[in-house]
Amino acid sequence: MMGLATLAFAACVSDKEVTVQTQEEKYEKAFEQLVGGQINANVNWGFNAQKVATFNAEGEYTGMRSHDKNNNLWGGYVEVPDSINQAIRNKVMEYFNNTENPEGVAVNWSDFFVQQVGNTDRGPRMNYMYCGNLTEHINDFNGGLGGGKRNVGVELKPGSDQQCIELDYYDGITLMTNSSTEYFAFHNSYDDTYYKDNYVIIPGEVIDAAYPNMQPSLAGMFFVGFDYQHDKTKMGEADVEARNYLFNDWVVRITPGMYKNRERIFIEDLIASDLSQVGYSEGKSDWDFNDAVFDVAYLRQQNDKDNYQTHDYAVITLWAAGGTKSLTIGGKEVHELFGQPVSKMINTAAPNGVDGLQPVIFRIDLGKTTDWNKVYDANEIKVFVGSTELTAEQGKAPQKVKVSKTTRWMKEMLIITSAYGQFASYATTNEPKDWYKTVTDASKLY
């Protein structure tokens, strides 16, 4: 009788078995609790085809109605830094002229501007400036100087779709693309030597701190200084000029290249978490969508590392890494790109985190151009936390959302709906599409 009872009980339990939820189903349920309703079937989380900045076979930007092939048309597709005025030059050179062997910093940019600031009487002996490696010559920078007047773009006149006005710069300025700020160097023809250990990168804030009463503020700027030397003993001549560890012999400003067609992506890595521990109030929730914040711009241009074949690129500008899991974008780990351990949260105002780090810019080579009409969607950029791919599928709970390039991201451990009140409405009704333009509490944004 006991055996029969046991069988009957087992059969009863089997009839009422509940299917175990997958991690995706748990995430979906938790997200719907966050936004207060079912996800709208049409919501696509902002992802759609992006504009590709296109260049012709000669490397000329083709995004304007007219252009001069002898001028640089940077202003059409990238944010050009302001001209350097004399007050800036005076303050920067004051620092480099009087600061011996300063401690520098590193920045990590594949695309950046270089602008002339100043030099000493030793500067003209430094012919050619290089960056990244000894094959990447910074064009128009020779003999301690940058080139003269440069036309850096054209703009349509107000109210006109035909006529353009030129934007003239009187600095020595050039744009480096698909390059690197890993190190800088100069070549000295006097002893036919490349010097790649004779430079330092100084943030503007350091100069401001050294000269607090001197205007203007240099916050957010970066300057590269070089220290001249030569040694002709290897050429059989008793002619040596040693370093003096003042990096004032040639000084330039570097500025990250921010492409105008970029769009911003917010990342949430909770899909790889124990969702049973997720809450929905400040300090308890991690629905902050700041586990990575990055911009994506698509370019179609020549690759001088591939015999000037035209390639498509995704240019990634990484702003923040608010998670403590290994997270990759296009195969690159975000904490490593910032030079930080995985345990550190970066640029999210996190307790024991690291703030104020400069963005990282890198490129993903999408291959040779075979279809000049091809368009891309930033949702195609692969993002993984560990071995789990983070996705944004229409009508499903997202781990990625796309917003405008100027949208500010959340501070750490503050849920996204507490600053962007219309996010919940967007998730459940598909309106408003520009939910990120309505900020209900700016104090919660980084």
Image: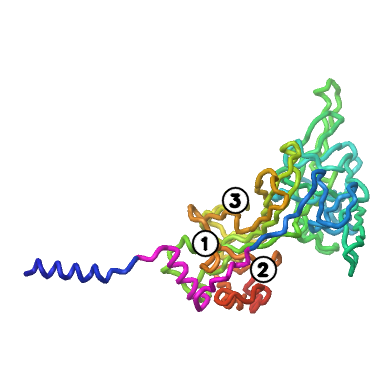
Give the amino acid type for the residue marked by disc 1 in the picture. Asp
The residue carrying mark 3 is 330
Q: Which residue corresponds to mark 1?
A: 269
- Give the residue number, with chain letter if any, for mark 2: 408
Q: Does the magenta stretch include residue 45?
A: yes
Which residue is drawn at the image coordinates 72% and 52% (left, top)? 373
Dot 1 falls on a residue whose secondary structure is loop
Identified at 80% across, 44% down, the residue is 57
> Mark 1 vs mark 3: which is more N-terminal?
1
Near mark 3 (Cα within 10 A), the count class, few <14, some 14-19 or many ≥20, is: some
Crowdedness near tag 1: few (<14), some (14–19) or many (≥20) residues, C-alpha within 10 Å: many
- Disc 2 crowd rating (10 Å Cα; few below 14, some 14-19, many 20+) is some
The amino acid sitting under disc 3 is: Gly
Q: What element carries label 3?
A: loop
Q: Is residue 438 above or below residue 403?
A: below
Magenta stretch in the rendered image: 20-47
State the separation of the CA atoms marked 1 and 3: 16 Å
